[in-house]
Amino acid sequence: MPVPFLGRDALVAAQGAGPERRLLTWTVDTAPGRDGADVIGDEPVWYDGDVVGWITSGGYSHHMDTSVAMGYVPAGLAGASGDSRSRSSASDMPLRSSTAVSGTPKANE
């Protein structure tokens, strides 16, 4: 006789509520080349003056010729258009939400 899944009710409730956080991708406004600074991970994500998430990874994208970052923010901020930035000990870097960050080259390249 099969044993029912004991966590079913909690799983159904969590699925109905949706995710608490979303993983987003940003391009980072920083000076080009060696004068710039890349995020590398564990930097805070600021939104309208408050820390709301964290960068999980980042670095320079040679394909896009810009610095990119990935990180988590509350799900309600996933499409927000306020002031997002990351701060490291070296600099304050504005973040721009990006859906264009990928490893797939453009068709004409």
Image: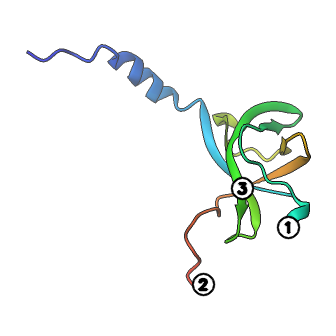
Q: Are marks 2 and 1 in contact (CB under 8 Å)?
A: no
Residue at mark 1: 33
Callout 2, which amino acid?
Glu
Callout 1: SS: helix
Q: Is tag 2's residue or tag 3's residue first in the polypeptide sequence?
A: 3
- Neighbour tally class for label 3: few under 14, some 14-19, many 20 plus, Cα within 10 Å: some
Residue 31 shows in the view: no
Residue at mark 2: 109
Q: Residue at x 52, y 31 (%)?
A: 18
Q: Residue at x 40, y 23 (%)?
A: 11
Q: Position of residue 55 (x, y in %)?
A: 71, 41
Distance Cα–Cα, label 2 vs label 3: 22 Å
Instruction: Please determine whether, in this image, residue 102 is positioned above or below residue 76.
Output: below
Instruction: Please determine whether, in this image, residue 29 is positioned above or below residue 13.
Output: below
Q: Are marks 2 and 3 in contact (CB under 8 Å)?
A: no
Number of residue marks: 3
Callout 2: SS: loop
Q: Is tag 3's residue or tag 1's residue first in the polypeptide sequence?
A: 1
Q: Quadrant of residue 41?
A: top right
Instruction: Classify residue 106 as left or right of residue 87.
Output: left
Distance Cα–Cα, label 2 vs label 1: 23 Å
Callout 1, which amino acid?
Gly
Which label sits on residue 6?
Answer: none
Which label sits on residue 59?
Answer: 3
Instruction: Please determine whether, in this image, residue 23 is positioned above or below residue 14.
Output: below
Q: Is tag 2's residue or tag 1's residue first in the polypeptide sequence?
A: 1
Q: Are marks 3 and 1 in contact (CB under 8 Å)?
A: no
